[in-house]
Image: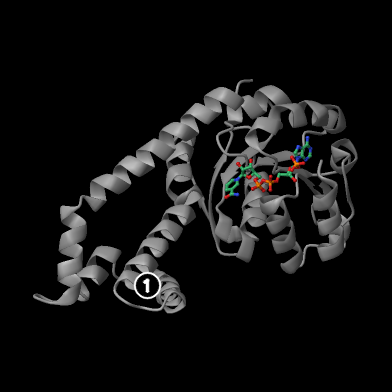
């Protein structure tokens, strides 16, 4: 039977997942939505025809799944408010809040609650996200599959069997779109400095990033091989890559991801206490 799914928080991410489910054929009468922000509720109502209100309790009352899509610092209070609505029914809790571990969620919702934690990224907004998922021992196969099908509505999913790696996932794919935007900015600005019109430089940078990613995703070769294939001896690409390597691009990204991973850990210390 089709599950009833309640979204607690329909900001950017919650709305994207809800929209993805509807596009995939999930019946609207099996979706519930709640958000503290009246504008977010109105948007979901207008865009998707799904009623939404500030009443988390009402949205959760008959749900088989609670998708928790509020900010990490809001989650503890949200959980406390939801427990009376879930009672002994133990719906699946699917949290996408960055840095909030399943131990904290189990502390808030009850140890035998099935819990899946997910870290999506912003391309989910156009159905091209990539998400990592981690399920607790209290989560059976059927509920794991249910969580996976929900996150598949906005892209591809990868399971982790070690939750501690969620901080590394956050550092790579969670925050990753912003690094690539930064690289695209750098490419466009550098093109401008070489005399290209700003609008053209931006389009060339964006289209190159999109095309290279599509090419690599569909290729049997890894990115290092693809790079070597387009780096002719004595050619232009070789010159640019030499400069990037001499500038320490590898160590720079390594430091950047380590800093993001450490911040993810610190956030869970701050907001993920049971
Ligand atoms: N955006 C990303 O790239 C990304 C990636 C991975 C994971 N995430 C995670 O996804 C979650 C949602 O992120 P987002 O970007 O969608 O945030 P968002 O746009 O701020 O959406 C969160 C929504 O929850 C509402 N809210 C606040 N308190 C609430 C409450 N007590 N009950 C019900 N709703 C409440 C907020 O309303 P107000 O505005 O009035 O507070 C807001 O409309 C976060 O935990 C984030 O860590 C985001």
Image location (x, y in percent) of residue 77: 75, 27
Frontmost residue, 160 versus 223: 223
Residue 24 lies left or right of residue 221; in this view the side is right
Query: Can see residue 97?
Result: yes
Answer yes or no: disc 1 within 8 Å of ligand 1. Answer: no
Question: At x 58% / y 44%, what residue is drawn?
Answer: 118
Ligand 1 in which quarter:
top right
Residue 272 point in image, percent of width and height: 60, 26
Q: How is the image coloured?
A: one colour
Image quarter of residue 223 = bottom left
Which quadrant of the view contains residue 194?
bottom left
| Residue 88, visible in the rendered structure | no
Q: Residues within 10 Å of mark 1 (few under 14, many from 20)?
A: few
Camera-side residue: 44 or 113? 44
Q: Is residue 32 left or right of residue 9?
A: right
Task: Farthest residue to the left: give it.
Answer: 234
Q: Is mark 1 on a helix, strand or loop?
A: helix
Q: Is residue 84 above or below residue 218?
A: above
The percent coordinates of residue 71 (x first, y second) are 66, 38
Quadrant of the snapshot with the N terminus: bottom right
Looking at this view, is 52 or 115 the one in front?
52
Residue identifier under label 1: 212
Q: Position of residue 59 (x, y in %)?
A: 86, 43
Give the side of residue 176 with respect to residue 222, left or right. Answer: right
Assign the C terminus to one quadrant of the image. top right
Image check: 161 left or right of 259?
right
Query: Which quadrant of the figure has residue 149?
Result: bottom right
């Amino acid at each position: 039977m089709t599950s009833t799914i309640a979204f607690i928080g329909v900001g950017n991410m919650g709305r994207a997942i809800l929209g993805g489910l509807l596009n995939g054929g999930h019946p609207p009468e099996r979706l519930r939505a709640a958000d503290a922000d009246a504008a977010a509720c109105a948007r979901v109502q207008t865009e998707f025809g799904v009623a939404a209100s500030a009443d988390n309790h009402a949205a959760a009352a008959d749900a088989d799944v609670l998708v928790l899509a509020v900010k990490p610092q809001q989650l503890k209070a949200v959980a406390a408010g939801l427990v009376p609505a879930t009672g002994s029914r133990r719906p699946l809790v699917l949290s996408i809040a960055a840095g909030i571990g399943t131990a904290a969620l189990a502390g808030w919702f009850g140890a035998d609650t099935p819990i899946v934690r997910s870290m999506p990224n912003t391309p989910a907004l156009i159905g091209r996200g990539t998400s990592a998922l981690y399920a607790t021992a209290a989560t059976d196969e059927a509920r794991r599959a249910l969580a996976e099908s929900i996150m598949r509505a906005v892209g591809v999913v990868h399971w982790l069997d070690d939750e501690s790696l969620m901080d590394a996932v956050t550092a790579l794919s969670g925050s990753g779109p912003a690094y690539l935007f930064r690289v695209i900015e750098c490419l466009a600005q550098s093109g401008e400095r070489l005399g290209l019109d700003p609008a053209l430089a931006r389009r060339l940078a964006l289209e190159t990033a999109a095309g290279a990613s599509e090419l690599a995703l569909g290729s049997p070769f890894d990115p290092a091989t693809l790079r070597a294939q387009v780096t002719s001896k004595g050619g232009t690409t070789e010159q640019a890559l030499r400069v990037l390597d001499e500038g320490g691009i590898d160590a720079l990204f390594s430091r950047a991801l380590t800093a993001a991973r450490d911040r993810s850990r610190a956030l869970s210390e701050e907001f993920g206490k049971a």
